[in-house]
Image (tube, grey):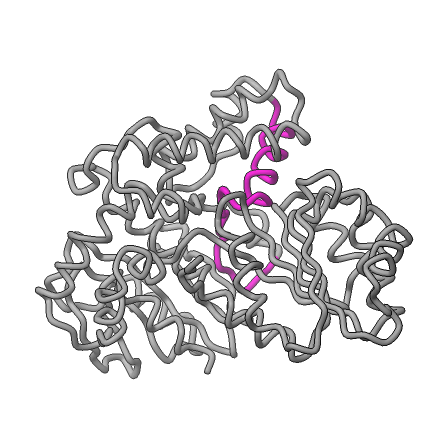
Amino acid sequence: MEYINRLILDKIKSGFINNRIIIIIGSRQVGKTTVLEMYKEYIPKDYLIFYFNLEDISSLSVCENFDSLKSYLKDKGTDIEKQKIFLIIDEFQYIKNATKLFKMIYDIYTNINILASGSSSIEIQKHLKESLAGRKKVYNMYTLSFEEYIRFKSENKYTEYLQLDYTSSSNNLIEFYNKDYLEDYLVYGGYPKVTLLNNKVEKIEEIQDIYNSYIQKDVKSLIRGENISVYNNLLKIISSQIGSLLNIHELSNTLKTSRREILKYLDILEQTFIIKLIRPFHSNKRTEVSKMPKVYLMDNGIINYSIGNFSHIAYRQNLGNYIENFVLTEILKYKPIQYEVYFWRTRQGTEIDFILQGDDELIPVEVKWQNSEKVYVPKSFISFFSINKNVKRAVVITKHVSTKIYKYDKDIYFIPAILFNKFLKEIGK
């Protein structure tokens, strides 16, 4: 079977240079199983490869504890003391004490490598931090980035896209990718199975199946059955407010449930890669934690399924919010690990959509999709520059315009939304 390459493969390859356990965490249907299959080609030939999909009961029984796995490998004629072994374990969250199993293998058998995937949950994240500290590398896997999306649609257009320069590309060429790729991406999102379908009804049905599977397999184990409807309604409200400040008190009143329950559901939504909460940037960390976050969704198909609207994206009144959400998801998929993302808002209402902080610098990013034909520095940048001295560059996200100017002793980049990932790849180098 011919697979389409995913960006995370390069991360996994580099991760195994200094680690023997690599774990991929992500929501259902983002392509984790496919990536595990693809990685088999990169495993050195002197390794014995064993693959376990733990949604299969027989595989789960083999991996449920250290002794059963060791017996299985011996029954297969494997010398677990001497031979190089590569274990690929899919959906490892089904093992009750997965991190205990991984820890024992790591500590006892230096000849065994593990590549595992799991649908994220609060319990998994907790155990990864507590039990496998210093023993593993964890990568978050998301739905397709825009670059990957183009590749899934057309290898030729993907090759052409790679040649585009984010500071000097033709407006007409940018408009082509906006019309032929971005508009569809903003409606149906980036789940691989959805992307490979061409029929609108089939796309929506696939998104529905993905969402229902998420509720049945991930959420019902964490929420009492009678509160699933509240959970769904919360997601629906959030989907209609992407890029907005999240008021917990208002949500509690609207859904007629406690603040504690709302916070619990938000945590589940974030830990299962459905939403992302962005905190405000402040030099005082205590202040940062105390202020309202902004909320975004990690896939546009889920947004539109939640609100029941798959109409043409160009005619939406809140198109700017969708672009802002798009920019945030690209940041999360491409930003270097040492960079964190925030937003900036003063008491007077001056606001910058995103602040990237890392490597002793701050990079303000403002989305100006609707007014993207003019090259001008937003007033909010000037205010931010006056307060923060460690700003060397700033970014204005545009619809078409791609250029760079030098002003206020800073490099100011004007980058089309569809090319912003190219800038993100270069920061931190």
Provide residue 396's location: percent of width, then percent of height. Answer: 26, 65
> In the image, which residues are magenta?
258-285
Q: Residue furthest left?
A: 172
Using the image, determine if residue 415 lies above or below residue 236: below
- Identify which residue is drawn at 48% across, 53% down: 142
- Identify which residue is drawn at 68% across, 30% down: 221
Front residue of 261 and 429: 429
Quadrant assignment for the N terminus:
bottom left
Instruction: Determine which quarter of the picture holds residue 23.
Output: bottom right
Q: Within the magenta stretch, is there residue 102? A: no
The answer to whether 265 appears left or right of 243 in the picture is right
Provide residue 343's location: percent of width, then percent of height. Answer: 43, 56
Using the image, determine if residue 189 lies above or below residue 211: below
- Identify which residue is drawn at 51% across, 72% down: 10
Q: Within the magenta stretch, is there residue 272? A: yes
- Identify which residue is drawn at 65% across, 51% down: 90
The answer to whether 389 appears left or right of 83 in the picture is left
Asked if residue 352 can be seen in this view, the reply is no
Using the image, determine if residue 18 lies above or below residue 150: below
